[in-house]
Amino acid sequence: MWTKQDLQQLVQRQIGEYRLIIVSNRQPYIYNLVEGTLRYVLPAGGLTSALDPLMQACGGTWIAYGGGQGDRYVVDQDNRVMVPPDDPAYALRLVWLTEQEEKGYYYGFSNEALWPLCHNAYTEPVFDLRDWETYQAVNQKFADLVLDEVGDQPALVLTQDYHLALLPQYIRNAAPDIVTGQFWHIPWPHPEIFRICPWQAELLEGLLGNNLLGFHIGDHCNNFMDTAARTLPVQVNAEYNRIEYRGDTTLVRPFPISIDFDDICQFSESAEVEQEMERLQEEWGLDGKLIGLGIDRVDYTKGIPHRFRAIGRFLEKYPEYQGKLVFVQAGVLSRSDIDAYQQLSEQIDQLLEEINGRFARNGWQPIVYMPDNLPAVTLMALRRLSRFCIVSSLHDGMNLVAKEFVASRFDNDGVLILSPFTGAALELTQSLIVNPYATEDMAEAIRDAVTMPEHERRNRMLHMRATVRENNIYKWAARLLVDLIQCARGSASGRSRYAATPTR
Ligand code: GDG
């Protein structure tokens, strides 16, 4: 099993003379101003927990957009600050974006064009020329900072996600010796879907600037290779997952992302979580109830209305659970400036009114909706209290919520109801896998979850826990890095400048 220490040792052994540069939209430490005092927070999610130890081990630079109100107060004249704040080990270098750049690049092209384009969720992408131009300009801005940071040294640049699809090509054009890798956290759609994008060729050329391109699962790799083959004069070697384009090679591989299993497991067992469970049972009236749980960013790809409809149908079909079952939906509101997200919020409110209005009685209501960014301890207590957790994504690269639920159940109890349209469904085969569009099947899966005998719940959970424990976030980061270093060795042997590196 991979640990944080194993990952750090691997980096120290293998990275040689290369400097590691990570580039992402989101920063690993965000400085805020709270009543005039500087405070930092770590963004939620698994990415920072995997890449931060990697950076701490090799002391490179992480380049990201400075989105905290306190960021400008902590950086030097090169917009650099050493992090982690309590034990500085690597540099965080920030890119500043104007309001107009954030609107066009982040809300516009990234989240109104690429996000819906890559998810089969039937939300039409918006292709706006100004957003596209801003996206190009911001990608260039990030690339300029990377080039400035790297200078003449041998470097590995590891870019995260769909906000920066053009950056690798900009880097390659300016400095072909830099070794580039990118991990695409969302799905890659079928070529028939991707081809509606007016700038499909430019996006593909951008990504083919990478030596290594990672997706969560093999299907997304295949979709990417098919899209490239249909769009550009590339040569695809499907057996070795390689694409040759204009004399350069991109290796396309699956790296299923995961979570810090041990960390979640330990936190879940803590006294703090136990106390919170007691508090919730008392103050939220959950004592003695059968609890179902959903935790999501409030996003139209997550199928939140679909699961609410299934809860409604379940209560209609099995009225004996009325008054007994409480479904808690926790979430964080995101991208609220975008129309499609406002429409989703309205749809959710309407369904809540409909379902709760229909079934509520004597102080009980079936769905408790908390779009409030609840504290980590409350979310963990809810995972522990739940009989089942529903992940009903309409399409999802991986879905970490499913893995977090499994990691938190050290008691080997709890049932996971999981959409087959998540990357996680390929690993968590002992969950109840059900199509979120099929309301009747979802209602039946809820019934199976609440009636499943304890020994079966236990067997399934034990199996899933073993899978997630072994395939944790450190294994993900190690595999990605090893492949990137292999690419560096391959390109070093083919080129003169770094022919002698990396040293072991
Ligand atoms: C993208 C891909 C891929 C959720 N609600 C709250 C909250 N969360 C945390 C979860 C989890 C994270 O946010 C969400 O991760 P997901 O994987 O579910 O989804 P995306 O945000 O869409 O992420 C996805 C992922 O990248 C990684 O590669 O798996 O497929 O779409 O950690 O626990 N955290 C808090 N309050 C909430 O209400 N604090």
Image: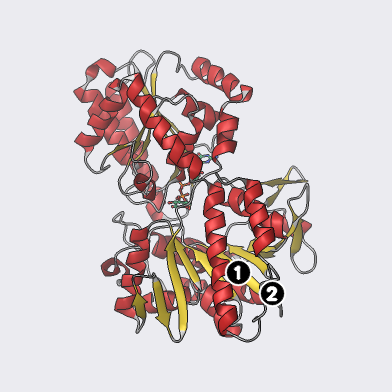
Q: Tell me: residue 309, above or below residue 45.
A: above
Q: Position of residue 365 (x, y in %)?
A: 36, 22
Give the spatial CA distance, label 1 vs label 2: 9 Å
Q: Where does label 2 land, which residue?
A: 150
Q: Amino acid at mark 2?
A: Val
Disc 1 element: strand
Q: Position of residue 38 (x, y in %)?
A: 76, 47
Q: Where does label 1 land, which residue?
A: 157
Tag 1 and tag 2, C-beta contact below 8 Å:
yes
Count the marks.
2
User: How crowded is the residue under tag 2: few (<14 C-alpha within 10 Å), some, or many (20+)?
Assistant: many
Q: Position of residue 491 (x, y in %)?
A: 56, 79
Residue drawn at x 62%, y 70% is 156
Q: Quadrant of the C terminus?
A: bottom right
Q: Tell me: residue 299, above or below residue 331.
A: below
Q: Amino acid at mark 1?
A: Val
**Side of 97 relative to 396 (left or right):** right
Q: Earlier in the sequence, mark 1 or mark 2?
A: 2
User: How crowded is the residue under tag 1: few (<14 C-alpha within 10 Å), some, or many (20+)?
Assistant: many
Determine if residue 114 is in view. yes
Quarter-of-image position of residue 187: bottom left
Disc 2 element: helix
Residue drawn at x 74%, y 42% is 35
User: From this viewpoint, which residue is outermost toward the front?
Assistant: 504
Residue drawn at x 50%, y 40% is 469
